[in-house]
Image (cartoon, grey):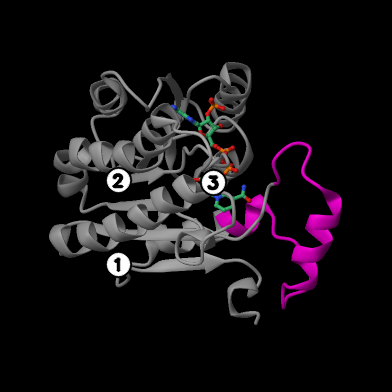
């Protein structure tokens, strides 16, 4: 039977490319989404058209509610095994320090940090049985924060810590790693001057693509002697002074 992967936030953008790349490498894919129903449905249809019964879609909100039972239960009922959990879903939004906004804190930390932890714990029995792996999508801004994004950066810094702590706790049965993209897929309406500025500070001289991130994920998925690591996929931007 194919190996199976659950990818959160995989309806479009980076998560969808990770799904397509892992599917090409023989995985069956559980595509989680929250609001991107049409994109998730189209992605699952295209994967199943390539190989029958190799993709399912599951909707839920990761900021609250019984999402662990829903997601892990769906994979368990459908395939009865889980080899890889990819915590990709995320909220990226600025934090206005002049306003007290506990809702924003709760929403961002719940989705970006609590959900990966809860899903990792919920997936443990199946991941242990498969001697599987967890991959968390962090950010180069986790350890070198981006101005204006305090809560997002704190959530990703927490996710880096969680990645390493789980790698230690779950070895030797389960490998846990992170992939930290630099700016890859831009927020709609992002300033083109900012993109140019970023490219000028990127040693490899170009912006990254979803495929660049998916390639790193595919590498970690099979890198059987790698755990507790965060791979930065940023064209060398983080070493630019
Ligand atoms: N884009 C970049 O250049 C970049 C740079 C650095 C790091 N990263 C990291 O790489 C990963 C993928 O990046 P991306 O830009 O493709 O991500 P994204 O579009 O910002 O978010 C991915 C998905 O997360 C889901 N999501 C958000 N809140 C949710 C909630 N409460 N419950 C369930 N799902 C929720 C959304 O699903 P729906 O659309 O279905 O609602 C969304 O499609 C993220 O972890 C991101 O932090 C990306």
Q: Quadrant of the N terminus?
A: top left
Q: Which residues are magenta?
A: 186-213
Q: On screen, 12 above or below 202?
A: above
- Left or right? Give the position of 116 relative to 19: left
- Left or right? Give the position of 190 relative to 100: right
| Mark 2–mark 3 CB contact (< 8 Å) | no
Instruction: Reply yes or no: does residue 61 show up in magenta.
Output: no
- Residue 75 screen position, x and y as percent: 30, 27
Q: CA distance from mark 1 to mark 2?
A: 17 Å
As rendered, which of 75 and 235 lies closer to the eye?
A: 235
- Residue 211 screen position, x and y as percent: 64, 54
| Mark 2 surroundings: few (<14), some (14-19) or many (≥20) residues within 10 A | many
Q: On screen, 193 above or below 52?
A: below
| Mark 1–mark 2 CB contact (< 8 Å) | no
| Between marks 1 and 2 in the image, the one whose residue lies nearer the viewer | 1
Residue appearing at x 57%, y 58% in the figure = 146
- Which numbered dot is residue 18? 3
- Which numbered dot is residue 83? 2
Q: Quadrant of residue 127?
A: top left
Q: Considering only order in the chain, which callout, 3 or 2, is on the residue closer to the N terminus?
A: 3
Residue appearing at x 36%, y 69% in the figure = 229
Residue appearing at x 19%, y 35% in the figure = 122
Q: Quadrant of residue 40?
A: top right
Q: CA distance from mark 1 to mark 3?
A: 20 Å
Which secondary structure lies at badge 2? loop
| Mark 1–mark 3 CB contact (< 8 Å) | no
Q: Quadrant of the C terminus?
A: bottom right
- Which numbered dot is residue 228? 1
Residue 62, visible in the rendered structure:
yes
Q: CA distance from mark 2 to mark 3?
A: 15 Å
């Amino acid at each position: 039977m194919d190996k199976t992967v659950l990818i959160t936030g995989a309806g479009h953008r980076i998560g969808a490319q990770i799904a397509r790349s892992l599917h090409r490498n023989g995985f069956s894919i559980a595509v989680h989404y929250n609001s991107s129903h049409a994109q998730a449905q189209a992605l699952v249809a295209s994967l199943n058209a390539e190989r029958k019964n190799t993709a399912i879609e599951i909707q839920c909100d990761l900021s609250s509610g019984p999402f662990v039972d829903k997601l892990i239960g769906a994979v368990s009922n459908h395939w009865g095994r889980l080899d890889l959990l990819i915590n990709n879903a995320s909220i990226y939004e600025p934090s206005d320090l002049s306003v007290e906004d506990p809702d924003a804190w709760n929403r961002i930390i719940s989705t970006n940090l609590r959900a990966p932890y809860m899903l990792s714990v919920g997936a443990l029995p199946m991941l242990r049985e498969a001697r599987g792996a967890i991959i968390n999508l962090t950010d180069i801004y986790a350890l070198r924060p981006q101005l204006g994004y305090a809560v997002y950066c704190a959530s990703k810094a927490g996710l880096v810590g969680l990645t390493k702590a789980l790698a230690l706790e779950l070895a030797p049965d389960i490998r846990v790693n992170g992939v930290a993209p630099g700016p890859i897929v831009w927020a709609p309406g992002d300033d083109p001057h900012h993109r140019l500025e970023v490219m000028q500070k990127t040693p490899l001289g170009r912006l990254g693509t979803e495929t660049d991130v998916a390639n790193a994920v595919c590498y970690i998925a099979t890198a059987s002697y790698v755990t507790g690591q965060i791979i930065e996929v940023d064209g060398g931007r983080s070493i630019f002074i």
